[in-house]
């Protein structure tokens, strides 16, 4: 057996528990709302800004993927236990990286995005003002 | 044989495009004007050949000819015929052939029906159209041949992605492509006008119907796509700021701006350079969108490496056409005079503000869509999604719709600020009333953006109708009605969006057969689960009875479908539409102990989103019809005079 084959075999053995996990029943709060509507709303607002990692461009709030269900359940349980949404977001980012959060304030690398509207509007305004003034000058 | 004939037709069409370009080139640069008389027949023939090629591919799909690789990997003999038919463009090669066919037919239409344009500009336009087509022919023939044979031919195909197996597939992509590619006509017009130094009001009047037609189709395509995603994905969302959606929104934003600036050019002979620029940008956005979607770069920068040939090819085309057009723009725009002047308070300024805000939104969507690609190139994966786009583009869009209401109430050339404010008293009063009403009803319970959306929608709806006041409604031109309906459609759509995000009620339950659930005035009785089978799927179906506030029970049957080829699960939501909203019920997974997950949403006024979209398209259609009819009537009046003079 080649080294590569051996590694593959080891990986396969190690992967078995992961495969078995998907056969488990869905996490308890994947599709069950919290009893307190205020906490549920808090959880839902957070879920809308967390990316489903196994889907294409969907938040975990609207995905059928089992992983999204697990993450929804995690979020609801943590919210019910009294954790703040931003603390949960930080925890998720620590685990999965910045990619998991749609919230553009979360990572410093995204801060330039907030300058974009100001710059674009400013540029447009300057262009427009210059034009109208120049036109007036001609008249 | 059919596949080979299709490929041959495509090669012939490509050769004709080359001929067309050469004819225009030599016809315009040498003194052999005879060459130009062959241009129009060439363009028409090219359109016919691309249509033939596409029809042959459709035939192959309908016959389930598995010896063709594309059919084998995207179709299956057990599919209903509608999906065999629509499956023709539910894949990369087929959709690119659709693109090329639309482009060929658009070119033929410009050759046949365009009469208002100066002859040399018309010819240069057809040359530009041939030039763009050539690139896409090359792309199709060299890296995406839809007619390639599979050897050996498989016994049956792999089937179509079940999410696409929906009547929506028959309507949404072709409409969108007609819109995307329709903008290529505006692009060619702009190039033609720059080449022949012919940018004026007459040119704008000739270009306007083409822009309008493409814009109507884009609007319809986006509206249909949004509703399709809404009912098919099973979570009640209707817009995800998905890069693929953004790719369709960007050309629409540019086309909307172009539509308004071309009107300024046609009416007042102002904004010449800007209109040409927008025409270039609009089709550039179509191509950028196609590149983003077709190259696979969107899912990940790394997906790009899976098929670098295609991605590089489209990227090359993009650089060539956009770069070429911008270079031409830079060279020639100095010779285009600025056009007529205008005052600060005037319809022109209003339309410039419209263009400015639409361009800003376009810029924001473009930056937001590309930003993750840029950071990923530096090794940092981030997501830019709904929280960013909603918060950034939302407020700009709200300001934009307020200007949309004010614009038509402002006079061309010069107006008084006080007079404009006077005409807006009623809309502003309605806006304040709505502010009071929504504050009392929902203050503190809904987000700021939906709150403002509801208030502004009310004011803008009334403001959109204001241009019709004190007018003789029977003598008001059709295109004015078109504008009013389109603007009203924006307000209607905005109201739907705001109401949906403000007032949606969500209920997730795990119910046993026989149990009853109540939410938002609805009572739902879950009777049990049965199994059903379709042509190529089996499904678990929930049998339910719903009634509203003690009314008659109605049977609904949400399904969880399982498709065999390829193996995929989809949800079929049960939708009940009422005048004030929609009930949306989805059957989820089994939850153990005989319970089933059921998701229920009551979505107040959500259908207004798509009703508004259809009104916008209808308004565009009326405007197009109104302008064209006026042209026909003028022509008819002139004709007897010519006869008499003869």
Image (tube, rainbow, N blue to C red):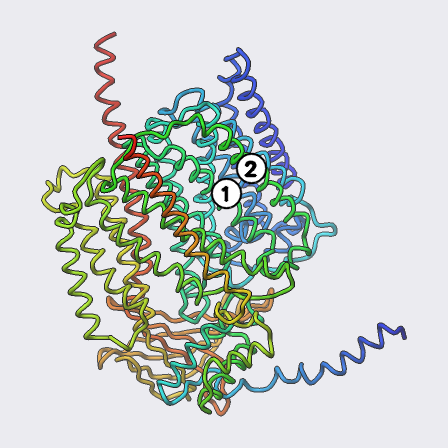
Mark 2 in CB contact with mark 1 (< 8 angstroms): yes
The answer to which quarter of the image holds residue B435 is: bottom left
The quarter in which the N terminus of chain B is drawn is top right
Relative image position of residue B169 (x, y in whole percent): 47, 55
Count of numbered circles on the image = 2
Residue B55 sits above or below residue B126 on the image: below
Question: Can residue B59 be seen here?
Answer: yes
Question: Circle 1 — which element?
Answer: helix
Q: Chain of mark 2?
A: B
Whichever of callouts 2 and 1 sits on the residue coming sooner in the sequence is 1
- Quick one: which residue is furthest to the right in this view? A1
Residue B475 sits above or below residue A19 on the image: above
Q: Mark 1 = which residue?
A: B284
Separation (CA) of disc 2 from disc 1: 8 Å
The reply, left or right, for residue B577 in relation to residue B294 is: left
Relative image position of residue B400 (x, y in whole percent): 31, 53
Q: Chain of mark 1?
A: B
Q: Indicate which disc residue B462 carries.
A: none
The residue depicted at 63 percent of the width and 37 percent of the height is: B138
Q: Mark 2 = which residue?
A: B321
Tell me the crowding category of disc 2: few under 14, some 14 to 19, or many 20 or more residues within 10 angstroms, Cα based.
many
- Quick one: which residue is furthest to the front in this view? A137
Relative image position of residue B265 (x, y in whole percent): 32, 33
The answer to which quarter of the image holds residue A67 is: bottom right
Q: Nearer the viewer, residue B453 or B52?
A: B453
């Amino acid at each position: 057996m080649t080294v590569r084959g051996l590694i593959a075999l080891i990986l396969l053995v190690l992967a078995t528990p992961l495969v078995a996990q998907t056969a488990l029943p869905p996490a308890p709060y994947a599709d069950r709302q919290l009893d307190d509507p205020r906490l549920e709303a808090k959880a839902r607002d957070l879920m809308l800004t967390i990316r489903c990692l196994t889907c294409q461009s969907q938040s975990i709030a609207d995905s059928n993927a089992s992983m999204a269900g697990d993450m929804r359940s995690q979020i609801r349980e943590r919210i019910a236990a009294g954790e703040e949404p931003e603390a949960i977001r930080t925890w998720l980012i620590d685990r999965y990286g910045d990619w998991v959060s749609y919230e553009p304030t979360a990572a410093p690398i995204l801060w330039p995005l907030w300058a974009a509207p100001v710059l674009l509007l400013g540029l447009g305004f300057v262009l427009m003002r210059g034009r109208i003034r120049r036109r007036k000058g001609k008249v | 044989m059919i596949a080979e004939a299709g490929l041959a037709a495509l090669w012939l069409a490509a050769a004709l495009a080359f001929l067309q370009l050469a004819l225009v080139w030599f016809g315009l640069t040498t003194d052999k004007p005879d060459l130009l008389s062959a241009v129009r027949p060439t363009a028409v023939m090219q359109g016919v050949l691309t249509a033939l090629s596409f029809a042959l591919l459709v035939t192959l799909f309908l016959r389930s000819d598995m010896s063709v690789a594309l059919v084998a990997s995207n179709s299956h003999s057990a599919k209903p015929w509608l999906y065999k038919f629509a499956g023709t463009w539910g894949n990369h090669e087929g959709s690119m052939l659709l693109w090329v066919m639309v482009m060929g037919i658009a070119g033929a239409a410009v050759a046949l029906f365009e009469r208002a344009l100066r002859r040399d500009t018309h010819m240069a336009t057809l040359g530009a159209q041939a030039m763009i087509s050539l690139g896409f022919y090359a792309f199709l023939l060299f890296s995406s041949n839809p007619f390639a044979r599979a050897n050996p031919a498989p016994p049956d195909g792999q089937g179509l992605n079940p999410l696409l197996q929906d009547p929506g597939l028959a309507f949404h992509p072709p409409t969108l492509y007609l819109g995307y590619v329709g903008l290529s006509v505006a692009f060619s017009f702009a190039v033609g006008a720059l080449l022949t130094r012919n940018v004026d009001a007459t040119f704008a009047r000739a270009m306007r119907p083409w822009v309008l037609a493409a814009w109507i189709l884009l609007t319809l395509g986006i509206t249909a796509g949004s509703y399709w995603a809404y009912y098919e994905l099973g979570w009640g969302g209707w817009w995800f700021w998905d890069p693929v959606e953004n790719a369709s929104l960007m050309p629409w934003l540019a086309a909307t701006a172009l539509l308004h600036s071309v009107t300024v050019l046609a009416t007042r002979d102002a904004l010449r350079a800007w209109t040409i620029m927008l025409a270039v940008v609009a089709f550039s956005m179509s191509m950028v969108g196609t590149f983003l979607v077709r190259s696979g770069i969107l899912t990940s920068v790394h997906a790009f490496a899976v098929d670098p040939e295609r991605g590089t090819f489209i990227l090359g085309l993009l650089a060539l056409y956009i770069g070429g057009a911008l270079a031409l723009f830079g060279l020639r725009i100095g010779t285009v005079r600025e056009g007529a002047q205008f005052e600060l308070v005037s319809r022109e300024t209003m339309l410039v503000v419209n263009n400015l805000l639409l361009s800003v939104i376009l810029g924001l969507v473009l930056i937001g869509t590309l930003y993750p690609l840029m950071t990923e190139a530096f090794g940092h994966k981030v997501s830019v999604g709904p929280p960013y786009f909603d918060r950034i583009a939302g407020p700009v869009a709200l300001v934009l719709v307020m200007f949309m209401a004010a614009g038509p109430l402002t006079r061309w050339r010069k107006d008084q600020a006080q007079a404009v404010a006077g005409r807006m008293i009623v809309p502003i009063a309605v806006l304040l009333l709505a502010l009071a009403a929504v504050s009392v009803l929902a203050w503190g319970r809904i987000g700021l953006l939906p709150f403002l959306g509801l208030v502004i929608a009310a004011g803008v709806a009334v403001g959109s109708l204001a241009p019709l006041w004190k007018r003789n409604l029977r003598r008001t031109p059709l295109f004015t009605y078109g504008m009013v309906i389109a603007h009203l459609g924006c307000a209607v759509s905005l109201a739907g969006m705001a109401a949906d995000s403000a007032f949606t009620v969500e209920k997730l339950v795990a119910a046993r057969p026989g149990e009853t659930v109540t939410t938002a005035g609805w009572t739902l009785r879950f009777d049990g689960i049965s199994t059903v089978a379709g042509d190529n799927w089996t499904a678990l179906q929930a049998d339910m009875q719903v009634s509203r506030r003690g009314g008659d029970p109605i049977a609904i049957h949400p399904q969880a479908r399982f498709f065999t080829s390829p193996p995929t699960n989809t949800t079929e939501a049960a939708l009940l539409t009422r005048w004030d909203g929609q009930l949306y019920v989805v059957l989820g997974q089994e939850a153990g102990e005989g319970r089933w997950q059921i998701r229920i949403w009551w979505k107040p006024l959500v259908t207004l989103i798509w009703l508004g979209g259809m009104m916008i398209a209808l308004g565009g259609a009326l405007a197009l019809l109104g302008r064209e009819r006026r042209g026909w009537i003028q022509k008819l009046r002139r004709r007897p005079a010519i006869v008499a003079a003869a």
